[in-house]
Amino acid sequence: MAREEKTAAWKPFVAGATAGACEAIGTMPLDVIKTNMQIHAGLYRNPLHAGKEIYLHGGFRALYFGLSALLIQTSGKAAIRFTAYEQICSLLKLFGMDRKEKPKQVGLIAGLGAGTAEALIWTTPTERLKVLRQKEASLGTNKYASLFGGMSNVLKESGIRGLYAGALPTAMRQSSSVGIRFMLLADVKKLLSNVVSPDSQAGSTFITLLSGGTVGAISVCVNNPVDVIKSKQQASEIKLSFVDCAHTIHHESGWKGFFRGLSVRAPRVFLAQSLTFVVFEGVSNLLKFV
């Protein structure tokens, strides 16, 4: 029994890491565009204009500024997310909350816990480095060009606390995102199953693809204001509080400022979560034979 538990524990970690890496590589340009739209108020008319300007400043490679940080971040946070989710589900079962009987409640609680864990353990420092590098895509500077060089600069200027700038909004964003996704996933899959036949493997994969993307898009529509505050806070090289950033955004653009980047973030996360859930499910199925 002990051997089975140990084996079960590492499988979601490996599957999550693989899914996260695929997500990062597949959606990086959209993430760069989204971040720059959020931190540069009024600079871009729309996502296409932002992408064009970033390309003109740094070429095609500028659309992958921060990839090393995002790749490490996304694979790491997905590994932590799915592992923590499974562990919290197991813990909740001990208290009489079985996910088969109460899928929404368990999905929300375990998702909130898993999202908070991934944010505080992994996402915040890597997101900080990624955002600082992405900011340079439209500035033509290279202060944070390398992952370790950027980390060294942040540590020299602000210490370890500098890597955790934006920890509060990051935790709020991740916990709400993951909680909403896992809470709604089963219902969305059931709804789509009534439209698309899941009898074949291709049909089942297509449903997972659409379901993952749908719950991802819903989650970003709910928490985009927090994501804008997070990007603003992490892009600043001076210490700004959550409230300071919120006030600045409102002063610059009014309430609509809290929805900057949503037009590109929603499709990016739709694609990202489609990839994540499909790859996670596929790798998990392969690991059943290990």
Image: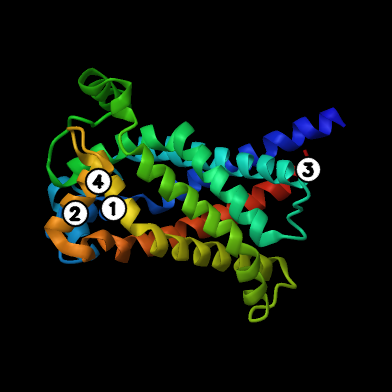
Within-10-Å neighbours for mark 1: few <14, some 14–19, many 20+: many
User: Residue 249's mark?
Assistant: 2
User: Residue 228's mark?
Assistant: 1
- Residue 29: x and y in percent read 32, 52
Within-10-Å neighbours for mark 4: few <14, some 14–19, many 20+: few
- Which amino acid type is shown beneath numbered disc 4? Val
* Residue marked by disc 3: 94
220 left or right, relative to 159: right
Instruction: Kindly tell me whether residue 116 is visible in this rendering.
Output: yes
Q: Using the image, determine if residue 164 lies above or below residue 139.
A: above
Q: Nearer the viewer, mark 3 or mark 1?
A: 3
- Which amino acid type is shown beneath numbered disc 1? Val
- Residue 48: x and y in percent read 22, 65
- Residue 266: x and y in percent read 38, 63
- Which amino acid type is shown beneath numbered disc 3? Leu
Residue in view at x 69 percent, y 60 percent: 103
Q: CA distance from mark 2 to mark 3?
A: 44 Å
Instruction: Kindly tell me whether residue 54 is visible in this rendering.
Output: no
Q: Using the image, determine if residue 284 lies above or below residue 188.
A: above
Residue in view at x 23 percent, y 18 percent: 156
Classify the position of the N terminus by image quarter.
top right
Whichever of callouts 3 and 1 sits on the residue coming sooner in the sequence is 3
Q: CA distance from mark 4 to mark 3?
A: 39 Å
Q: Nearer the viewer, residue 147 or 78?
A: 78
48 left or right, relative to 198: left
- Residue 192: x and y in percent read 62, 75
Q: Secondary structure at mark 3?
A: helix
User: Residue 243's mark?
Assistant: 4
